[in-house]
Image (cartoon, helix red, strand yellow):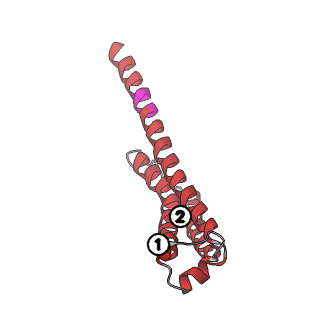
Amino acid sequence: NQKFALSLATNTGSALGKFNWVAILLFIVMSVLQFLSMKIPQWLQKRRTKNVAKLQKNPTQDKNQRTMNMVSYMMVIMIIFMGLQLPIAMTFYWTVTALIGIGQSVITQAIVAKNSNKKEKKKTVKYVKK
C-alpha cells in the first residue's frame, strides 16, 4: 500500500533519484503543463489574429515576439531546474497552477472571440440597414 506513497516535503530531485514513479510522473506532467501554460496563450492569440491582414511588416513587433518566446522558454527551464531542488509540494503546486492558467487562457480567449463576433455582427447589421 505504501508503494505509491510520497511525502510532500521530500526533495523532488532525491525522489527522482530513488525512481519513485509518482514523483517522476508528477515532475513530467508539471514540466509539460508549464510549457503549455506559457505557449497556449500565444497559440490562441496567433490563431485569433491570423485572419487580420498585415498592412506592413513591423520589425519592433517581430523583435518583441522573439524576446517573448525566449523568455517563455527560459522561464520553463528555470521552473524545471528549481522543481528539482524544491520539495514535491512545489511541483504539485506548479502543476495545479499551470492547469488553472491553461483553463484561464482558454476561457478568456473564448470570451474575447464571442465578444468580437457580436461586434462584427452589429457592424454587419448597421451596414445592411443603411
* Residue 37 seen in the figure: yes
Name above or below for residue 91 compared with residue 118. below
From what the image shows, is residue 121 above or below residue 32? above
- Residue depicted at 44% across the width and 55% down the height: 43
Identify which amino acid the numbered label 2 is placed on: Gln
Picture residue at 60% right of the left edge, 61% below the top: 93
Which image quadrant is residue 14 in?
bottom right
In front: 27, or 130?
27
In the image, residue 13 lies at what x, y percent?
60, 81
Q: Looking at the picture, which amino acid does disc 1 mark?
A: Asn
Horizontal side of 83 relative to 26 (left or right) equals: right
Task: Give the residue pinned by disc 1.
Answer: 1
| Label drawn at residue 128 | none
Q: Position of residue 116 (x, y in %)?
A: 44, 33
Characterize the local packing of mark 2: few (<14), some (14-19) or many (20 or more) Cα atoms within 10 angstroms.
Answer: many
Q: Nearer the viewer, mark 1 or mark 2?
A: 1
Q: Quadrant of residue 82?
A: bottom right
Q: Which residues are magenta?
A: 115-120
Question: Label 1 crowding class (10 Å Cα cut-off): few <14, some 14-19, many 20+?
Answer: few
Residue ID at (62%, 68%) = 8
Does dot 1 land on a helix, a strand or a loop? loop
- Determine whether, in the image, residue 73 is placed left or right of residue 51: right
What label does residue 34 carry, if any? 2
Residue 86 point in image, percent of width and height: 67, 74
Query: Is 117 a magenta residue?
Result: yes
Could you tell me which secondary element the residue under label 2 belongs to?
helix
Q: Residue furthest bottom?
A: 17
First along the sequence among labels 1 and 2: 1
* Residue 75 seen in the figure: no
| Cα–Cα span, label 1 and label 2 | 30 Å
- Considering only vertical position in the picture, is 129 above or below 58? above
Residue in front for this viewpoint, 3 or 106: 3
